[in-house]
């Protein structure tokens, strides 16, 4: 038996070693090997603009089309992002150069754009649209070279290179519109090691484009679809006049270069952030702030509590103690159930659901399993996880509802399963109607909406009921003190014990610990950047949990010392105070960073921001509530009460 165990152990170790050496990349994504002259398919994803926030599919503009248009089957995340991956007529072969080739089938007959089409292209150029293509699942990037703020001598030698996702559809000069009608593709390949007698294999590791605007007269095309590019200095750009028909040629060229980049590292170009130092600075800043806070909190709260508990537990000074004010005086009311216990437990259940979903998504993404190469995987995973985490949300909500002396568990379960998701679905549906009106590919089609509703009522709802049933049947939370029959009168509170002041005070610290990360997340959402620093995000999330818990404990301690025992709802609201700062930051970001002027893009921005703020409030409120609840139970368990 021991011999068998040893053999099994050896096999497992060897399998793990093989796995780590051969396939250290994203699970489920295998490399494609190309031989010389193999076709490399160029596909189009969508058109995007950070000015309108409305994606459009590639063929919404009059680009050259292949004989048969085929759309790729897409996952839920891709559909929700507005991706519509489709084939294009570009003919690219591995390691085969192309000087200049006409894209549409009639080389001597230029493409004629109608007035309507010209107007549409001009409008998209004015709205600053980018075109996104992919080759072997790698997105196209435009290389930007600029001099950094170095010394004068170094300036001449070294340029900083950054990449822009996609390429600009065109540009404006004064009131004139110019379309990028010639694309120079630069593809980089890595030659794989093969045995001597085998044909060499190649893998695509980078995909760049240099877009150019070249006037029809300067592009000399022959009958074989070949064309000659003009000298860079003498060519005029291709103007699009929206008031009349325009004639032009769509052309492209292909250049291949060998690269040392291995296939497993090919996404590094797209994911390199020039601001990793800012990230480390923000993490260190957050950690220092949280540790500083923890130290102060621990000292103050523990010393004060020890003093309180020692005083309260002294047998001989009972008369003096009774005259004092403090948290012991409200022991008979501190666990009195609040108003609307069903809604409170439902919101906390949704908060638990969100917390579990976010924790798992960030952790899995940190391990590299939700790479941007598997498009839409992050959103698909988040949607499904939220559905399946309903069982935990239901369990915690049910148990809390039972503790708060609730009896109608079926209604409570239904409320938990529909309150927060219902608000999210309602806002998304209204926004979707506006996106539909704009004919954008970002609009969720009716079948997808039905599928999401089926997931909600077919997966999430039954799981919430299941969790709620077991949570409600379980022993309620054990409160260490009995609740009096008659509620105690609450003394008049000072101005700084106001709810809104509490929200402002409690929100600063968790927000300060994470606001730099928020900038990168906003850039990823609103400016079509890739976000892939999930390791940082995981650290920030843990810092957020710790700071929310601590602030919540401090706030509830002050409240109980002021003899105000109505802490249930207040703690939930105040702990989510950082969501208020997220809202302020979102408005600041909108005004200063984004160039949105139209009504519908602004509506989309604030609609989605409202969802983010609501979700963030639920998340931080839930973290704070459970920290405060544990704290209150602990301190009242430590004092002797007659």
Image (cartoon, grey):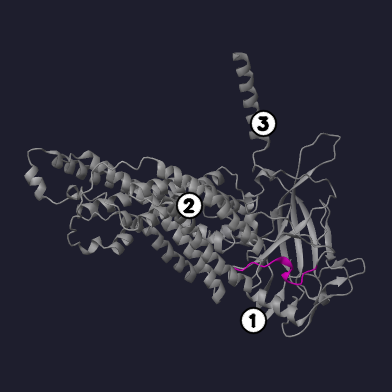
Front of the two marks 2 and 1: 2
Residue to which mark 3 is pinned: 18
Element at label 1: loop
Element at label 2: helix
Q: Examine the rendered structure and indicate whether residue 402 appears above or below residue 601.
A: above
Location of the N terminus (image quadrant): top right
Estimate how packed mark 1 is, as few (under 14), some (14 to 19) or many (20 or more) residues with alpha carbons within 10 Å: few
Question: Residue 515 location, x and y as percent?
Answer: 43, 57
Q: Spatial distance from mark 1 to mark 3, Cα to Cα?
A: 60 Å
Disc number for residue 279:
2
Disc number for residue 587:
none
Estimate how packed mark 3 is, as few (under 14), some (14 to 19) or many (20 or more) residues with alpha carbons within 10 Å: few
Residue to which mark 1 is pinned: 174
Question: Residue 283 location, x and y as percent?
Answer: 44, 49
Location of the C terminus (image quadrant): top left
Cβ atoms at labels 1 and 3 below 8 Å apart: no
Front of the two marks 2 and 3: 3
Front of the two marks 1 and 3: 3
**Mark nearer the N terminus (2 vs 3):** 3
User: Toward the viewer: 500 or 169?
Assistant: 500
User: Toward the viewer: 69 or 266?
Assistant: 69
Res. 175 in view: yes
Q: Examine the rendered structure and indicate whether residue 219 appears above or below residue 293.
A: below
Q: What span is in magenta?
A: 52-64
């Amino acid at each position: 038996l021991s011999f068998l165990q040893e053999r099994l152990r050896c096999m497992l170790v060897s399998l793990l070693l093989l796995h780590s050496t051969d396939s250290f990349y994203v699970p489920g994504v295998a490399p494609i090997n190309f031989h010389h002259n193999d076709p490399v398919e160029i596909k189009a994803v969508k058109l995007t603009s950070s000015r309108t926030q409305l994606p459009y599919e590639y063929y919404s503009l009059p680009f050259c089309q292949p004989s048969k248009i085929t759309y790729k089957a897409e996952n839920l995340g891709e559909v929700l992002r507005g991706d519509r991956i489709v084939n294009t007529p570009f003919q690219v072969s591995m390691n085969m150069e192309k000087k200049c080739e006409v894209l549409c089938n009639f080389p001597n007959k230029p493409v004629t754009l109608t007035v309507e089409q010209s107007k549409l292209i001009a409008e998209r150029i004015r709205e600053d649209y980018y075109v996104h293509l992919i080759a072997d699942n790698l997105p196209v990037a435009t290389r930007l070279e600029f001099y950094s703020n170095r010394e004068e001598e170094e300036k001449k030698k070294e340029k900083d290179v950054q990449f822009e996702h996609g390429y600009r559809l065109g540009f404006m000069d004064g009131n004139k519109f110019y379309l990028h009608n010639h694309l120079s593709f630069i593809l980089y390949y890595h030659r794989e090691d093969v045995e001597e007698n085998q044909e060499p294999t190649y893998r695509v590791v980078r995909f760049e484009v240099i877009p150019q605007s070249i006037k029809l007269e300067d592009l000399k095309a022959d009958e074989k679809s070949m064309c000659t590019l003009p000298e860079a200095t003498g060519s005029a750009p291709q103007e699009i006049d929206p008031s009349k028909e325009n004639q032009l040629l769509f052309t492209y060229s292909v250049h291949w270069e060998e690269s040392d980049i291995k296939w497993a590292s090919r996404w590094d170009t797209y994911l390199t952030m020039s601001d990793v130092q800012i990230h480390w600075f923000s993490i260190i800043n957050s950690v220092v702030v949280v540790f500083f806070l923890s130290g102060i909190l621990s000292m103050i709260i523990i010393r004060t509590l020890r003093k309180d508990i020692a005083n309260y537990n002294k047998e001989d000074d009972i008369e003096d103690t009774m005259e004092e004010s403090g948290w012991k005086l409200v022991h008979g009311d501190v666990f009195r159930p609040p108003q609307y216990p069903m809604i409170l437990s439902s919101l906390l259940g949704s908060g638990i659901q969100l917390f579990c979903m976010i924790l798992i998504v960030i952790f899995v993404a940190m391990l590299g399993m939700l790479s941007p190469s598997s498009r839409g995987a992050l959103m698909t995973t988040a949607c499904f996880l939220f559905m399946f985490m309903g069982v935990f949300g239901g369990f915690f909500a049910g148990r809390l509802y039972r503790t708060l002396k609730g009896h109608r568990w079926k209604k409570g379960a239904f409320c938990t399963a529909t309150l927060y998701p219902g608000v999210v679905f309602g806002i998304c549906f209204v926004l979707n109607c506006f996106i539909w009106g704009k004919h954008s590919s970002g609009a969720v089609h009716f079948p997808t909406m039905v599928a999401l509703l089926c997931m909600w009522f077919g997966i999430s709802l039954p799981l919430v009921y299941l969790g709620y049933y077991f949570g409600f049947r379980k022993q309620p939370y054990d409160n260490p003190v009995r609740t009096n029959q008659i509620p105690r009168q609450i003394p008049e509170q000072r101005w700084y014990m106001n709810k809104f002041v509490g929200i402002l005070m409690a929100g600063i610290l968790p927000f300060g610990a994470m606001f730099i990360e928020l900038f990168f997340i906003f850039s990823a959402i609103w400016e079509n950047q890739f976000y892939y620093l999930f390791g940082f995000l995981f650290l920030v999330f843990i810092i957020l949990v710790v700071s929310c818990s601590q602030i919540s404990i401090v706030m509830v301690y002050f409240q109980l010392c002021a003899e105000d025992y109505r802490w249930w709802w207040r703690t939930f609201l105040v702990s989510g105070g950082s969501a208020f700062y997220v809202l302020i930051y979102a408005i600041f970001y909108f005004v200063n960073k984004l160039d949105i002027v139209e009504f519908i893009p602004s509506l989309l921005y604030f609609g989605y921001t409202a969802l983010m703020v609501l979700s963030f409030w639920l998340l931080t409120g839930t973290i704070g509530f459970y920290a405060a609840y544990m704290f209150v139970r602990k301190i009242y368990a430590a004092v002797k009460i007659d």
